[in-house]
């Protein structure tokens, strides 16, 4: 099966050890010729210097087309504009524009309430400089109790000028297909790329999934739990399952696949080797 274009998400390392890990991962994953890679941004400025430094490192030292994430919550127009100028100077032409989640205890919400306002701002103040990706939630955003309102809010980001969307990860391909169908019915025409989370550590996955509202189907949870500390068995089962889901997504028309790597190469490579 021909694989569609792929992209990888990294987080910005803060220590020398983490930097060495990212270098290793970036080197291995570069051999798969990703369309681009992206680097997350801690809402509220927790990675204010780390994200641009990492983007620059990935571009300069690894020759990757690295795109920064930019979360607006807690930031001011001036701060975000300065970052955008910095990214422009580095040669970045793609941005993943998000609202983000304020760390608990941080009261200052900043100049923007929603990602749609950030997209509008980038289009108004830096038009033509960036291809803008936004987040999408096939299983509904965790703070939303109205799936239809969530869809309309998603459309508002596209109407504000986003060029494409990357979804939160999921393990129900049908949720993705339904979300894409619903978005198309509302008139959304941009590519909606599934975000894929390979599985390497079930405890960590359960924690992430609780926080971001991604459902781990009961039978998968039960299976992973049953493997206990048998890391190899978890990896094999999970890679088979995630690769099967990717196959379905590609056959169903997904335009490309975006992998959440958590700065590790092995779980992503295990999935991709099953697809190639
Ligand atoms: P929004 O699109 O603004 O939506 C947030 C919530 O507000 C939703 O419930 C929506 O329905 C609601 N809403 C939107 N507009 C309105 C309106 N006008 N009125 C009322 N309600 C409204 N987080 C980070 O901190 N850093 C990252 O680097 C990062 N990368 C991510 C990458 C991807 C691909 C994805 C999918 C998520 C990422 N996140 C990241 C997480 C994201 O920041 C959180 O999910 C956050 O809670 C929502 O961000 P958003 O941009 O989707 O927000």
Image (cartoon, helix red, strand yellow):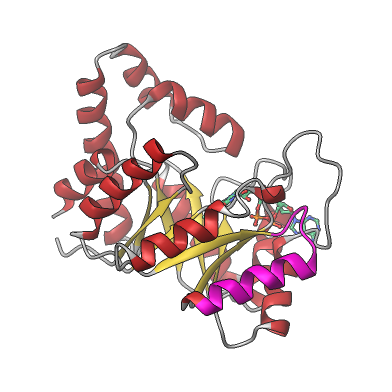
Per the picture, the main secondary structure of the magenta-coloured stretch is helix
Report the front residue among 101 and 76.
76
Can residue 259 be seen in this snapshot? yes
Where is the N terminus found, in terms of image quarters?
bottom left
Part of the protein shown in magenta: 72-89
Q: Residue furthest bottom?
A: 128
Tell me what residue is drawn at x 46 percent, y 56 percent.
Answer: 54
Q: Position of residue 2 (x, y in %)?
A: 16, 65
Tell me what residue is drawn at x 21 percent, y 51 percent.
Answer: 28
Tell me what residue is drawn at x 24 percent, y 15 percent.
Answer: 230
* Tally of numbered tags: 0
Where is the C terminus found, in terms of image quarters?
bottom left
Tell me what residue is drawn at x 65 percent, y 63 percent.
Answer: 154
Can residue 131 be seen in this snapshot? no
182 lies above or below 107: below
Q: Residue 29 is drawn in which quadrant?
A: bottom left
Q: Residue furthest right?
A: 107
Q: Position of residue 25 (x, y in %)?
A: 28, 47
Reply yes or no: does residue 10 show up in magenta.
no
50 lies above or below 250: above
217 lies above or below 275: above
90 lies above or below 45: below
Q: Position of residue 100 (x, y in %)?
A: 67, 51
Q: Position of residue 166 (x, y in %)?
A: 49, 60
Q: Residue 185 is drawn in which quadrant?
A: bottom right
Q: Is residue 42 left or right of residue 254?
A: right
């Amino acid at each position: 099966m021909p694989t569609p274009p792929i992209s990888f998400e990294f987080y910005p390392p803060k220590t020398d050890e983490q930097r060495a890990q990212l270098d290793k991962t970036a080197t291995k994953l570069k051999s798969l010729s990703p369309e681009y890679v992206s680097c997350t941004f801690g809402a509220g400025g927790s990675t204010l210097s780390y994200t641009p430094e990492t983007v620059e490192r990935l571009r300069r030292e690894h020759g990757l087309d690295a795109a920064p994430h930019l979360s607006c919550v807690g930031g001011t127009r001036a701060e975000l504009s300065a970052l955008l100028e910095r990214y422009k100077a580095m040669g970045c032409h793609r941005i993943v524009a998000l609202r983000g989640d304020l760390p608990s205890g941080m009261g200052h919400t900043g100049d923007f309430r929603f990602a749609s306002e950030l997209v509008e701002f980038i289009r108004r103040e830096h038009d033509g400089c960036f291809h803008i990706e936004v987040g999408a939630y096939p299983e509904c955003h965790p703070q939303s109790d109205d799936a239809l309102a969530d869809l309309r809010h998603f459309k508002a980001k596209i109407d504000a000028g986003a060029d494409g969307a990357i979804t939160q990860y999921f393990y129900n391909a049908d949720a993705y297909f339904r979300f894409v169908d619903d978005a198309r019915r509302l008139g959304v025409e941009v590519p909606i790329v599934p975000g894929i989370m390979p599985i390497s550590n079930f405890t960590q996955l359960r924690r992430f999934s609780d926080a971001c509202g991604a459902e781990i189907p009961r039978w998968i949870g039960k299976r992973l739990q049953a493997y206990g500390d048998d890391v190899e068995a978890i990896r094999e089962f999970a890679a088979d399952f995630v690769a099967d889901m990717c196959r379905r997504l590609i056959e169903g028309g997904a335009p490309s696949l975006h992998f959440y790597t958590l700065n590790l190469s092995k779980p992503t490579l295990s999935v991709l080797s099953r697809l190639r």
